[in-house]
Amino acid sequence: MKHGEKIGVFYAAFSYIIWGVLPVYWKWLSSVSAEEILANRIFWSFIFMLVLLAVTKKWKVFLQTLKDIKVNKKVFLSLILASLLITANWFIYIWAVNENHIVETSLGYYINPLISILLGVFILKEKLNKAQIISFCIAAIGVLILTISYGDFPWISFSLAITFGLYGLVKKMIKVDSAIGLTLETMTVAPLALIYMIYLLFTSNFSFLNGSLKIDFLLIGAGAATAIPLLLFAKGAQRIPLYLLGFLQYIAPTIMLILGVLVYHEHFSTAHMIAFICIWTAAIVLSIGNSKWFISLTNRIKKDKSFSA
């Protein structure tokens, strides 16, 4: 592995580790409502990104990007949609963690790549390879087992996977630097977040600046906790192959699962185990199927068959 790839693996793996342990951060804020945490997360992420743009001297690029988006209606609407989707994803995630559904959130991020595949098929008209078809069928069996066992559809998992999958799809239409992209997205919804925070202030339900320095620092820190892993991920993704990124992405939900079961003692039944084994198997099949090694191997087999024929 080249030096650049090693650095890329470090950045990407570290970003997924941070995402994996984020439930602990939201648990520290369990005394605050999910709506207020979300509003603070949006607002302080926006402030953090403005400071970062100033430090990294990207203001000119940011302002130019803003001008370009204003005259491009399609990109402008895509930005609004991306902002709403990531806001919905953040809210569901924060709410689920603080309502003791960490195991379900981990399932959501395990099945996210499969949801992205489906979106590619139905929206971008992409064709599935055999590995993708097999992995999707295995994952579907796991989800079906879990649904029958619960007697209820795992809506938290699918809401997280679908909102993040759609967010990724929309982001393809907004080809901008990751730091500028996050600044634009948080800027779009920051006014709503600020209005809600002011409303809480006047109704005496505001947790921020209400006596607990720990809560104040955690709410402000939500901005950095949001931005830092995203920026690390962007740096890592630039340096390593897509198949390797595919393997690394399962670090975060694995850590979430361990936290949910071993640290926060959430319910984990036999049905959960069977479902997760199916999801893990599907993830392995999908990752191997998308690897350069597997693709080159299948191409060689096809060539050998054509020669023998």
Image (cartoon, grey):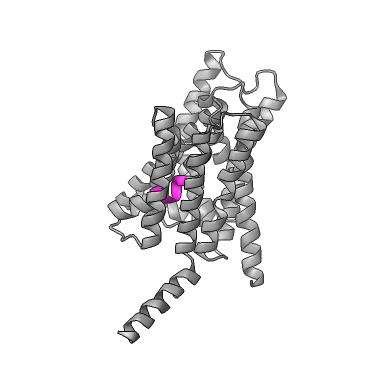
Q: Quadrant of residue 303?
A: bottom left
- The verdict on residue 40 being magenta is no
Quick check: 83 above or below 63? above
Q: Quadrant of residue 267?
A: top right
Q: Which range is magenta?
A: 111-116
Quick check: 246 above or below 216? below
Q: Taking 60 as reference, is 175 left or right?
A: left
Q: Position of residue 82 (x, y in %)?
A: 40, 44
Quick check: 209 above or below 111? above
Q: How many marks?
A: 0
Say which quadrant the C terminus sits in: bottom left
Say which quadrant the N terminus sits in: bottom right
Could you tell me which residue is drawn at 45 percent across and 56 percent down? 64
Magenta stretch: dominant SS? helix
- The verdict on residue 115 being magenta is yes
Could you tell me which residue is drawn at 35 percent across and 47 percent down? 78
* Res. 56 in view: no
143 vs 173, nearest the viewer:
143
Could you tell me which residue is drawn at 38 percent across and 42 percent down? 80
Could you tell me which residue is drawn at 36 percent across and 56 percent down? 133
145 vs 214, nearest the viewer:
145
184 vs 308, nearest the viewer:
308
Q: Position of residue 233 (x, y in %)?
A: 57, 54
Q: Position of residue 285 (x, y in %)?
A: 47, 58
* Res. 215 in view: yes
85 vs 113, nearest the viewer:
113
